[in-house]
Image (tube, helix red, strand yellow):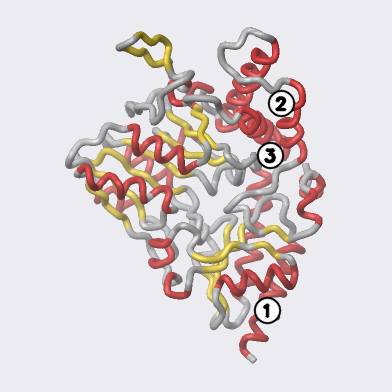
Amino acid sequence: MKTTDVRRDMPLLDKIIYLDAASTTPTPRHIIESMNDYFYNYNANTGRGAYHLAVRATQELEQARKKIAKFINSDPKEIIFTKNATESINMVAHGITWNKGDKIIVSNMEHHSNLVPWLNLQDRGVEIKIIKADENGVIDPGEVEKALDEHTRLVTITHINNSIGSVQPVNEISRIVEDQNAFYLVDAAQSAGHINMDLKKLKADFIAFPGHKGLLGPVGTGFLYHARDSHAKLNPLNLGGSTVENVTENYFELTESPSCFEAGTQNIAGFIGLGSATNYLGRIGISKIEKHSKKLTKIMYQGVQDIENANVYGSPENIYGIVSFNIDNINPHDLAKILDEVKSICVRSGFHCAMPSLRHMGAYQLGGTVRASIHYYNTREEIETLCETLQDVSKFIKT
């Protein structure tokens, strides 16, 4: 599929220049149609229903799980449906039995969703060790290695930072963690659906995925990858319908994973849509998406950097899909609003739920940054329009 084919599947893009993929992406027609098919033709609950609509709904939901597993090269039983990557991370934070003196290693470049749940464990006597990034927002694997000791239970890191787009050396860190008796969690919120992820090399115990960003799926969907060969024991966050095999007045027996983690009625249509979205991405080809986005990222970075009074964060050699910047003497929210009003350019502004990372990059005191983020549906012409508009705004502010 070409970029023009994808754009035809997203009517929203006829009216705007959408540069906020790091927050969420437009949903292609095909994915919406697969969800409508559920509502129109077999809108029933999944599980133990014997009538044909319930049977089909159950089959389609499990087929979606298989599609997702195939897309990331995993076993379907390693896929636990969640609302988003945040819920996936919290499932791990609350599901592991922590002991006083346990240690968690996390970077200062994390989204709040991969920092606050760990900070919250300090009340239980868990030590949180923060690894600081370099001036480009990249973590040195050697610093992780130095921080590891016999008390370390978990190392967690984002694959691509959401505030400036810096790509973290997750495979190198994986090899370091593998030598220790520690768990490894990767936040793939900004990499899933954008770049090739080799789970065999990554060797993570847990990977948190959102459905509504790079995967082009509907909002309210996500999943947790939990490696079956991992030594990590995870307790269910919620209990209830579908999580138990047998119940008496004073006893219950849990079902096997993933069912024991998926209490109650699921977002059936949403996950069916997410399964269709992974098929859709497969038709495009992840390598094609990666090549396209790398090219546009460099063009966008250079175009913004060429503006005299603009400040761009991170290194052009090590960011992907996201360009975060400020223009002197203008608040990022004001700049984002100007871009919207003048050229219908949609970008994100502020702290991006990543305050520590923007403090580290020196942008916190500026009110955060303006963040432009892309996917396969974006074009070079859109990036050029962004840069030309920023140039005009910059000149106006200077005068």
Question: Which mark is on residue 285?
Answer: 3
The crowd level at tag 3 (other Cα within 10 Å; few <14, some 14-19, many 20+) is some
Secondary element at image label 1: helix
Secondary element at image label 2: helix
- Which badge, 2 or 1, is on the more N-terminal residue? 2
What residue is shown at x 17% (from left), y 42% (from top)? 101
Name the kind of residue labelled 1 in the image. Gln
**Front residue (pair 230, 62):** 62
- Which badge, 3 or 2, is on the more N-terminal residue? 2
- Residue 302 picture location, percent across and down: 62, 70
Q: Is residue 118 left or right of residue 374?
A: left
What residue is shown at x 71% (from left), y 26% (from top)? 38
**Residue placed farthest to the bottom in the image?**
399
The crowd level at tag 2 (other Cα within 10 Å; few <14, some 14-19, many 20+) is many
Name the kind of residue labelled 3 in the image. Gly
What residue is shown at x 47% (from left), y 22% (from top)? 258
**Front residue (pair 30, 241):** 241
Separation of marks 1 and 3 at Cα, in angstroms: 34 Å
**Which residue corresponds to mark 1?**
391
Name the kind of residue labelled 2 in the image. Tyr
Secondary element at image label 3: loop
**Which residue corresponds to mark 2?**
38
Q: The C terminus appears in which quarter of the rendering?
A: bottom right
Q: The N terminus appears in which quarter of the rendering?
A: top right
